[in-house]
Image (cartoon, grey):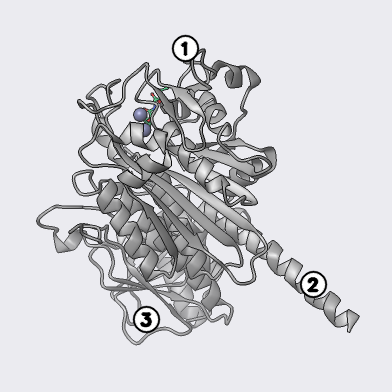
Amino acid sequence: MTSTALPATGATTTVRLARALPEEFDALLVPVFKGEDGLELAASGLFEEDIEIAIWELLSAVGATGAAEELTRIPSIDGIDTDFILAVGLGEDAKLDDDTLRRASAAAARSLKGIKTVVTTVGTFGIQPVVEGTLLGAYSYTGHKSENPESSAPVQEVIVYSPKKSAERKFQRGVIAAEAVNLTRDLVNAPSSHLYPASYAAIIESLAAEHGLEVTVKDYDTLLSEGFGGVVAVGQGSARKPFVVQLRYRAPQATKHVSFVGKGITFDTGGISIKPGASMENMISDMGGSAAVIATIIAAARMNLDVNVTATVSLAENMPDGHAFRPGDVITHYGGKTTEILNTDAEGRLVLADALVLASEDNPDVLIDCATLTGAQIVALGNRTSGVMGDKKVRNRLAEFGRKVGEHAWAMPLPEELVESMKSPVADLRNVDNTRAGGMLSAGCFLRNFVGEGIQWAHVDNAGPSFNTGSAYGYTPARATGVPVRTFIKFLRDVDKQTQKELKAAAEESTQDS
Ligand code: BES
Ligand code: ZN
Ligand code: ZN
């Protein structure tokens, strides 16, 4: 039997919302600003003025400046029953934004390793970003290490103080978004020894059951008989055969349908066009697109968004073997289009092609695919900025939302000459052209051929942003990042908001009529 749970997950903290200070806590986290005349302490309203002044004096004496993400630890003072006070800088008051709050909360959470209970008053400047930054920043993955020292365990509990009534919804939204990101990280961090198409499909099935999502699983025999030539070709060289899984969330009030497609290559050796050995281990992350779309649909369901959402993922392991597909092969995709294979390492687009055709059958309003598709994305935009291609409106919206939530993204074109260069003399298409020019864009041009008529489509290449090969920064840990889950959630929330408006207008109209 295949296991239906991940064998290892990252550790993070837990958060709780409180309207008043709890009886007991080990540390107090307070926000400070960089003012024109030096350090400024934001009044929380929790303490007498002389206590606030004493905190400010102590922080000033040890040189705190209030610069963004600066951390200053001081002993507690009379009147506050806690072990120590940690001040976190938020920079200049006038420049404060959500991402500063997220990064500051993350830096603070990380520096509180091994502590039991902390109260933060930073949430008075924005509940959702503080909750997100805390849960995302505290995350760390030690996987299959036999022993983890207690001192390196994340802070156990962060109590987010807010006196406001409206805090509860924002708090919940932050928790759901951060948990979706951390689920993505857990899936992407899992090594390919443990996460392979069958085990991944089983995990998705159990997640679907847990969150009340409809699920359809196509196994290898089904893929063969239904003609999923792209997924079959890529997966046939592995002893662990491929799967295609679809999840559906249906909202009773929805007027729009957003369909996601994700690349789920559980390991990419390159196949017969084998990759060089250096850094090949990072290819455990080649299912980052699929993990992001699965976590997104779960978040949509947990938030009860009024949007119909579908997620389709192609799961395969790209291996060289006696059964492997080869350069020169011609394959027939689901739906009938043919592709000449010139490089078996350009496998992501092949499994996505089948999935895009399948997802198009529902005729969704918007189709968004996400894939760790090309090294060329990293050459063009670096490690932290996803490339977004496709139909102008949805492409630009995703790029803008990405930047808004701190998951950097940039709109890229699909140039006509690259559309041409993806055509083959012996098949409808070829999977690579004969230059290296614009490799991220030509991959996008290839995918466009598989999107149904009249469907608004965007393609997100997150090859670099999905996996951080360096060390932690901001709220991004080492290894899997969970990008671009929060961008997708924001996109869906925007559709939900438009739907609410439409529903309200329709309701008003019907009361006027009667
Ligand atoms: N999975 C890789 C892309 C990738 C590279 C992801 C680096 C993350 C980090 C993809 O399947 C691939 O190998 N693409 C080739 C395409 C080429 C053969 C046209 C590449 O980018 O080299
Ligand atoms: Zn590849
Ligand atoms: Zn790949």
Snapshot quadrant of residue 108:
bottom left
Q: CA distance from mark 3 to mark 2?
A: 53 Å
Task: Please tell me whether mark 3 sits on a helix, a strand or a loop.
Answer: loop
What amino acid type is highlighted by mark number 1?
Answer: Asn
Task: Please tell me whether mark 2 sits on a helix, a strand or a loop.
Answer: helix
User: Left or right of 256: which side holds 262?
Assistant: left
| Residue 62 in sight from this viewpoint | no
Q: Nearer the viewer, mark 3 or mark 2?
A: 2
Residue positioned most to the bottom:
23
Task: Assign ligand 1 to one image quadrant.
Answer: top left
Q: Which residue is mark 1?
A: 434
Snapshot quadrant of residue 72:
bottom left
What amino acid type is highlighted by mark number 3?
Answer: Ile
Q: CA distance from mark 2 to mark 1?
A: 54 Å
415 or 57, which is in the foreground? 415
188 or 51, which is in the foreground? 188
Residue 15 point in image, percent of width and height: 38, 72
